[in-house]
Amino acid sequence: MIKPTILRWGNLTPIRKVRRIIIHHPAAVRYSYLQIHNQHRNQGWSGAGYNYYLQKNHEFYELRGLNVGAHAANHNSDSLGVCVEGNYDREQMDETLFLKFVQEVKKLMNQHGLTANDVYRHSDVGQTSCPGRNFPWARFKQLIAQREEVKSIVHEPKQKEVMYVKAEDFQWSSGKEQFEAVINRHGNKNELDAYKAGKLTVSDALGVLSKGILAEPSQTVASTHKDAWEDLTKRGIFNGKNPNHPITRAQQATVIKRIEEGN
Ligand SMILES: [Zn+2]
């Protein structure tokens, strides 16, 4: 499963046709997708340059997804940059992580009608050792060329790595002040205490955000509906509040009655 993220992006351009996959490592033993995103935004880019990222916690994240990435000079417009956490110039890849990576790359190949011949190392197209001298390339190519699914990936690591939300993570995501306003109004005591102690997990942070969105839907009226909304509010058919709330049948009855009464 591909995990969506809560990142904030600059301008992105969709890829017209995916013709290749280029494999990377970030050359860092531990590097979260948030760190990559922050680093690349600080370089002035639209955000994390890779299209997808497999972390050592076995989560496979969609970063640029099907938008043009920034991962291999002169080769970005028609390729997906797929990166696996680690520094494979120095370390060996864990077998379960390797097989998970094989599985995810095969899924992307299937989605875009690509074969193993369309999968390259960054070092095949640029001056770099990426994805690292120890990356098991021959075996990787052999496994992605296999028609059968890679089956031996059944066990996830016993201890899932827990990621905590830290203030600096918000620099290029939903905004620290905004998040704190939401957690102060809608977080429960455990969530607030955890956040203050720097121990709020990313998944709990997402939960707090969705509670906030449910409790406080946007008050902005989309431009298509603006004239109608203002007119019907003036005529007293709607009360002008909560333009994006759903309407119940009982409320619809009231609206119809007000129209029938000639408002
Ligand atoms: Zn690379």
Image (cartoon, rainbow, N blue to C red):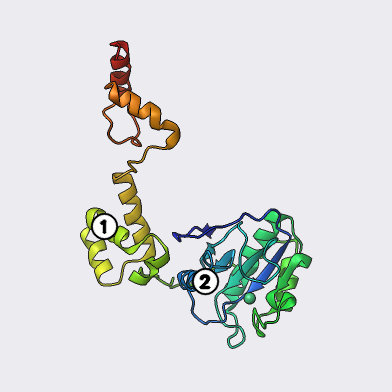
Residue under numbered circle 1: 181
* x 68%, y 61%: residue: 77
User: Residue drawn at (42%, 65%), measured in percent from left and top?
Assistant: 172
Q: Nearer the viewer, mark 2 or mark 1?
A: 1
73 horizontally vs 86: left or right: right
Residue flagged by tag 2: what amino acid is it? Gln
Up/down of 186 relative to 176, above or below: above
Give the quarter the ligand 1 occupies: bottom right
Q: Is mark 2 within 8 Å of ligand 1?
A: no
Whether residue 199 is visible here, answered yes or no, is yes
The answer to whether 83 appears left or right of 244 in the picture is right
Q: Disc 2 designates what residue?
A: 55
Rendered location of residue 56, percent (x, y): 51, 74
Q: Residue furthest left?
A: 189
Q: Along the line of sight, which residue is nearer the eye, 51 or 113? A: 51
The residue sitting at the top extreme is 261
The quarter of the picture where the C terminus appears is top left
Residue 181 percent location from the top left of the image: 26, 57
| Residue 154 can be seen in this image | no
Three-letter amino acid code of the residue under disc 1: Ala
- The quarter holding residue 75 reads bottom right
